[in-house]
Amino acid sequence: MSTSTVARARAIRWWDHVTPAPKDPINSVTEAFLADPCPYKINLGVGAYRDDEGKPIVLQCVREAQAKIESSNFLESNSTAVSSKLVEESAKLVYGEDSDVIKEGRFAGVPALSGTGACHLFAELQRRLYPNSRIYLPDPTWSNHHNIWRDAHVAKKTFRYYHPDSKGLDFMALMDDVKNAPDGSFFLLHPCAHNPTGVDPSYEQWKEISSLFKVKNHFPFFDMAYQGFASGDLERDARAIRIFLEDGHLIGCAQSFAKNMGLYGHRVGCLSVLCDDKTQAVAIKSQLQQIARTMYGSPPIHGILLVSKILSDPDIKATWLKEVKVMATRVQRMRAALRDSLEKLGSSLDWQHITNQVGMFCFSGLTPDEVDRLAKEFHIYMTYDGRISMAGVTTKNVDYLANAIHEVTASDQDAKVLCNLRA
Amino acid sequence: MAPPDPILGVSEAFKADNHELKLNLGVGAYRTEELQPYVLNVVKKADQLLLEKGENREYLPIEGLAAFNKVTAELLLGADNPVIKQQKVATVQGLSGTGSLRLAAALIERYFPGAQVLISSPTWGNHKNIFNDARVPWSEYRYYDPKTVGLDFEGMISDIKAAPEGSFILLHGCAHNPTGIDPTPEQWEKIADVIQEKNHIPFFDIAYQGFASGSLDADASSVRMFVARGMEVVAAQSYSKNLGLYAERIGAINVVCSSPDAAARVKSQLKRIARPMYSNPPVHGARIVANVVGDPTLFKEWNEEMEMMAGRIKNCDNMTNKWHVYMTKDGRISLAGLSLAKCEYLADAIIDSYHNVS
């Protein structure tokens, strides 16, 4: 046998030791939903906006921006300019139109692969500049936050956030954990429309948190994925960040245009890091660009063109602001409708958290077993933590949903009745 | 402060320069006569189709657009390739060549801790950076021989042989960057022999499929030969050059495994790596490629446009064949190889190649 035949005879198998990865908890909900043939199934899993027909939409502002882009000849020489425009306009949304930070160029800003990409860049930067630091994540938080900092090799801890009994904020425990963390710790905060709980600190609470952060010299990193979805007003939803800005913190902020512009698949967002001065900003920006260069080079231009156009064209921007309000309002209406429906069914459980919580998600309080039953018996899909994406609720399906929840919580209701009887 | 990227830094400096006669001979990106990035006609058509369809902008799955993944694997390996039919290929959409290489690097780091990647000397500047940031050790194998201005084949084979068993050998599928020098088919067979002998893993970077010879199939012959031998192969693809989609960041990582089960497991781990990096890949470029490659009319047109682009590269062949000036097929020249005495000669060569070669 020739050498090459011998070589060919030996078939090497390199991947035997590779185990199947666990499924992503959020994506697997969508997969299960898609696989279900039931015509009246409901997807309450992924945080993607749907209209009242349950359909994904393309915003009018996006269509208009698209038309303007098509008609102009994109020259390569524009790409840096367009990226810079995106960063500048994005920063205005976070820090304010007239912010000094922007005027003085005191921030490092780069376009990023939506919110995930922005968080990832920051996590990598954190490891490079503060290799022994940790990130404090709220408990609970978006599941992918844990993956991001873990893969960036940054140690993680959690701080108390959600109070399961009140289904609201555990403010005392939060402040306690912030106080007990070593000085100069890195904290991840959701500035509005917390994912998955929908529970946000009040204005006064944010002020107290900011003060304590100042005392402790902590680094506040904001992940803003839902600006506009909490109140319907983008400025109002940035309030928490503005408080920190006023108090003189040098913050970091990840922004996503996936939800509020409906540009999910285009992966467009922004990472900004406030700096002492312009020199520092230039240095940090170069580090971020270098991190990005070995990961994917640069972000895709299509999304950048769209967002840059939407934000810099006053008419299109005005349309966008109106559309954000429409989306947020519809979600708020569905919250009211769901709560109303459950109360009308005579549920003895307390459902006010449905309307107290804000943004796209409702942390329903449903148990994993109940979530399972909802999927198997009612073809209603949500993540096991009981998080409901309210954007998936429509006028047509809200009563069906309420009925289903009412049914699966029957034993909880019985337990409550028994409890009350005994008391 | 991070140092400017050696390649992109040139483009940045070029953009900052206001002189009317400026010329960018930096990045290896195809240009029109007006020196604008060339937007292929098929891409314009595909783009128009997308606009008319009014596709939504929802998230792609983590592994990317299914239609894209199907056509990209077929383009690389041939639609009738048994490994595709037997579902032995794990394909995940990546952000161009860079993103796809990074996914592979992360997979190597996780599942072959300590294993080295052997890269050619020289190679594309970003290869080292990618493996460094992914914490994958690398070393070099001899490739370019300045004495012969050709491939140092003996050196290459020798260095691959000397590498510890189970190393990943990074090979440029075609149109080696930056030298433009590719092994002959016979040399490829010998390279495959030694990789098999040493239980190494072939890791292809295919950034120029179709661009090297004008034929998509011919340019994939090296990869296909390895796969035909029953070898498990890792292959990163990019559509930055051959479809001019640099800015849209579209590519793929393919892992040809020995079984469908292995392919499924590998794919799941690639997804696990991608999720914290960027959650899911961008949709626009993927749709364009899927439309162009998946539509017989557009695909045929693409092949024709490719030949035309490769034809411009015939200017470069004229430089070599007629004037004995050696440069990479994508038109890249290194002025470091130029002496004062030869400037006029080079000028003559360039003028002749542009004016007299159609």
Image: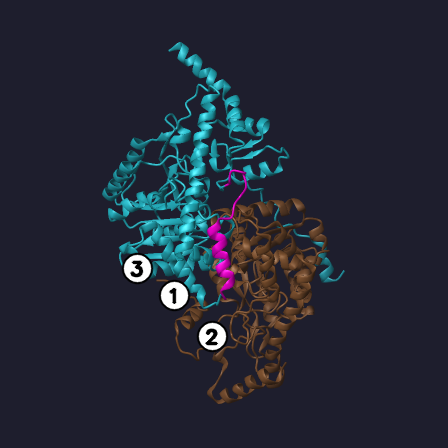
Circle 3 is placed at which residue position? A105
- Residue A51 sits inside the magenta stretch: yes
Circle 2 is placed at which residue position? B24
> Mark 3: few, some, or many residues within 10 Å (few <14, many ≥20)?
some
- Of residues B331 and B53, the one nearer the viewer is B53
The number of numbered badges drawn on the structure is 3
List x then y, in percent, for residue A64.
48, 55
Q: In front of the other: label 3 or label 1?
A: 3
- Of residues A308 and B180, the one nearer the viewer is A308
Span highlighted in magenta in the image: A50-73
- Of residues A122 and A52, the one nearer the viewer is A52
List x then y, in percent, for residue A330.
45, 38
List x then y, in percent, for residue B342.
50, 88
Quarter of the picture containing the C terminus of chain A is: top left
Circle 1 is placed at which residue position? B3
- Residue B185 sits inside the magenta stretch: no
In the rendered structure, the colour chosen for chain A is cyan
Q: Does residue A178 sit above or below B127 in this rendering?
A: above
In the rendered structure, the colour chosen for chain B is brown
Which chain is mark 1 on? Answer: B
The verdict on a common chain for dots 1 and 2 is yes
